[in-house]
Amino acid sequence: MTTYSCIIGLIITLIFTIDSGNYLLSIVDSFLTSIGILLSIILEVFIFSWFVGLDKLLNVLNKNSTIKIGIWWKIVLKYITLIILVFVWIDGIISNTIQENMFINLILTMILIIIPLILTKSSLRNDMTNIMC
């Protein structure tokens, strides 16, 4: 699986070495910084603060730290940080779709969603076959 990932990565990065590679690199860079990374941060903050539970973490942090964290930290992480990140993410989507490279952004979005799903599914399939053997 690692070999296939390396070969696919090599083929994808070879695109950036052609004449229009700098233009494509700037499109991919603006896409990843304004859409991809922010989306992953939003998902991490959302899952961490709403599903994992901040109360458990708050107890551990207060027990092992000299600076005590109060209820305001939970409020800031659950609501304020999430709202600000969503607004910045939406602004990035709007500014990227106004540009003429919307088709490339759509392809990058599909890659950002489909490849992790395929890799997760194949990893789960391998884990299940190892468990059954």
Image (tube, rainbow, N blue to C red):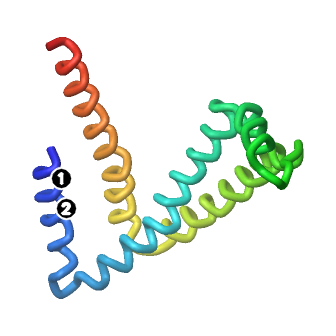
Q: Is residue 131 above or below residue 35?
A: above
Q: Quadrant of the N terminus?
A: top left
Amino acid type at mark 1: Ser
Relative to 45, 12 lies left or right = left
Q: Residue at x 19, y 65 (%)?
A: 12
Q: Secondary structure at mark 1?
A: helix
Q: Residue at x 28, y 27 (%)?
A: 124
- The answer to whether any part of residue 79 appears in the image is yes
Crowding around mark 2 (Cα neighbors within 10 Å: few <14, some 14 to 19, many 20+) is few
The circle on residue 98 is none
Q: Residue at x 46, y 74 (%)?
A: 99
Quadrant assignment, res 60:
top right
Q: Residue 121: where, in percent of width, then height?
A: 28, 31
- The answer to whether any part of residue 78 appears in the image is no
The front one of 32 and 53 is 53
- Disc 1 versus disc 2: distance between alpha carbons? 6 Å
Q: Is residue 96 above or below residue 18?
A: above
Q: Residue 8: where, in percent of width, then height?
A: 15, 57
Q: Quadrant of the C terminus?
A: top left
Q: Residue 91: where, in percent of width, then height?
A: 63, 65
Q: Secondary structure at mark 2?
A: helix
Amino acid type at mark 2: Gly
The front one of 33 and 91 is 33
Task: Name, please, the residue furthest toward the top.
Answer: 132
Q: Residue at x 46, y 58 (%)?
A: 36
For label 1, the residue is 5
Crowding around mark 1 (Cα neighbors within 10 Å: few <14, some 14 to 19, many 20+) is few
For label 2, the residue is 9
Relative to 68, 120 lies left or right = left
